[in-house]
Amino acid sequence: MVCGGRHLLSSTILGIFASSGITATGTNAVVLAHSTSPYTTAYPWSAGFGTKYADPATLPTGTGRAAQFIPNGTAVAIAHSTSPYTTAYPWSAGFGTKYADPASAVPGTGFGLRWDSTGTNLCIGHATSPFISAYAWSAGFGTKRADPATLPGTQARDVTFMANDADVIFTQDSSPFIGAYAYSSGFGTKRADPATLPPNVNTGVDNRLSADVAVMGAGSPYVVAYAYSSGFGTKYANPATLPAGGLGNPDVKFSRSGSNIITAYGGTPYTTAYPWSAGFGTKYADPASLMPDNARGVSWSSSDAAVAFGHSTTPFIAAYAWSAGFSTKYSNPATLPTGEGNVLSFN
């Protein structure tokens, strides 16, 4: 999930694996994209899951890959596997009437999506050329921005805007596995690739306070981070204790304060987290109560007091209190999502 599932994408370093907006309106909520109809499920959030919101009246048309709230919390978008590949709704303590589809459609499976910090641009990584698309946004999809002059080499898996909205970062399936464009109401010049490339396919990307970018992928060291200033700078040293794997559709998110970084991946313990201060600190202890299977998306709550995951077996969603590390696992929702959890978002 980059420009967001899995996803994520803002003024914090979030997952071209997704991430949530930074300013909420109305009731706090968490929304999950998942594999089975209704393809997205949302809950109120107040130190735990509330009663499930009603499903949208018009559902996404296929497997939900990533969910993302707009920064002011008044809309939510879902990237999914069948046409029109991205669906968006007004949000006010529940899903409103679906917005009209873009006049110029997303051309293939949507993998990740992210709004910029002002909520006036929405970027989507997808399976079909041009692999990355962006739209003006004003209470609905506006004009599609012109495609980049230099396209990604293959499908873009995740996208994120840097905090000043002057760059957009994406991950992709083939070398160099990560890329970036200057951005100003549309794609500008492609930035030079990092001097030290990530080692393998990357599916999650996030940014921290305009200064750092992290990606999560399939090959050791699984999580890689760079300094960033109008282009990729020096790669940070790998964590002393690496994540245990990168299977599935791994994700990565910086906390909203920028002081922590957390990963989600396939293989026990399914998540690994670190303090962050211009590099990876000492790994936090694993959660006492692990998720039952592969984690595919991660998002921080608005106050950084909780972190939630989408994962591949029932209950499909899990959340933990956070206080300088993983604390108690919250009770599962009373009404569970219906299928494999992917990228999710708090507002």
Image (cartoon, helix red, strand yellow):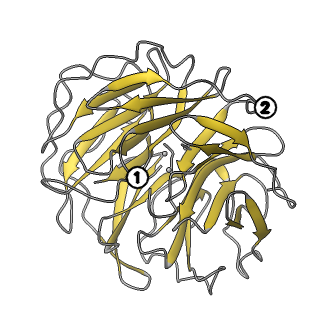
Question: Camera-side residue: 39 or 98?
Answer: 98
On the picture, is 312 further left or further right than 176? left
**Which residue is at a point 79% across and 31% down the rendered structure image?**
153
Image location (x, y in percent) of residue 283? 60, 82
Q: Quadrant of the C terminus?
A: bottom left
On the picture, is 208 further left or further right than 22? right
The single residue placed furthest to the right in the displayed view is 195
Mark pair 2, 1: CA separation: 27 Å
**Which residue is at a point 72% across and 61% down the rendered structure image?**
222
Q: Which mark is residue 342?
A: none
Callout 1 amino acid = Ser
Relative to 185, residue 142 above or below: above
**Which residue is at a point 56% across and 57% down the rendered structure image?**
206
Image location (x, y in percent) of residue 242? 71, 73
How many neighbours does mark 2 have within 10 angstroms: few (below 14), some (14-19), or many (20 or more)?
some
On the picture, is 222 further left or further right than 286? right
Question: Camera-side residue: 118 or 47?
Answer: 118
Instruction: Give the residue number, with chain letter if any, for mark 2.
Output: 153
Task: Tally the marks.
Answer: 2
Q: Quadrant of the N terminus?
A: top right
Callout 2 amino acid = Gly
Instruction: Give the residue number, with chain letter if any, for mark 1.
Output: 117
